[in-house]
Image (cartoon, grey):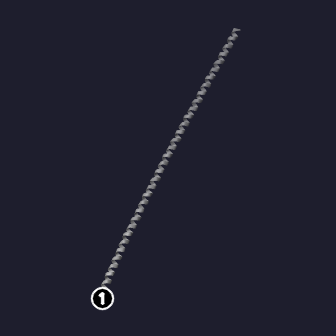
Amino acid sequence: MMETAYNIGMMETVYNIGMMETAYNIGMMETVYNIGMMETVYNIGMMETVYNIGMMETAYNIGMMETVYNIGMMEMAYNIGMMETAYNIEMMETAYNIGMMETAYNIGMMETAYTNQNVNCLHILAS
């Protein structure tokens, strides 16, 4: 009976050691799982960081395009202004040329009047 009791005690001891090893192994697996979870969280954080950096770059690039667009708008406005200036200069030249023609016409009128006066004088002298 004592041997039986001893053997039962040995089996219980073996069982208990087995239980502890099982518990240890479960603990190890939980540790590995937790480490894996932390790595996953870290990797998700990294992806979010990369995403956010990408967003900032996108925003920067959009800003650059808007800047280029605005510079283009200013150049366009400048060019339109230049065309308007050229148009206005052309208008002034046209007005000047019309003025010159009017002056020439007026000079011609005066010459005509002068000639008519001379003709009148000749008529008077001839009579």
| Residue 13: % across, % down | 31, 83
Q: Nearer the viewer, residue 4 or 90?
A: 4
What residue lies at 50% left-to-right and 41% top-to-bottom? 75
In the image, residue 60 sits, relative to residue 36, either above or below, namely: above
In the image, residue 33 sits, relative to residue 116, either above or below, namely: below
What residue lies at 56% left-to-right and 34% top-to-bottom? 87
- Of the 4 image quadrants, the one containing the C terminus is top right
What residue lies at 67% left-to-right and 11% top-to-bottom? 122
In the image, residue 54 sits, relative to residue 84, either above or below, namely: below
Kind of residue at badge 1 = Thr
The picture quadrant where one finds residue 121 is top right
| Residue 84: % across, % down | 56, 37
Q: Say few, some or many: other residues with alpha carbon within 10 Å of mark 1 (under 14 / 14 to 19 / 20 or more).
A: few
Outermost residue on the top side: it is 126
Where disc 1 sits, the SS reads: helix
In the image, residue 115 sits, relative to residue 16, either above or below, namely: above
Q: Nearer the viewer, residue 46 or 68?
A: 46
Report the residue marked by disc 1: 4
What residue lies at 38% left-to-right and 69% top-to-bottom? 33
| Residue 31: % across, % down | 37, 71
- Taking the image as shown, residue 85 lies to the left or right of residue 113, namely left
| Residue 48: % across, % down | 44, 60
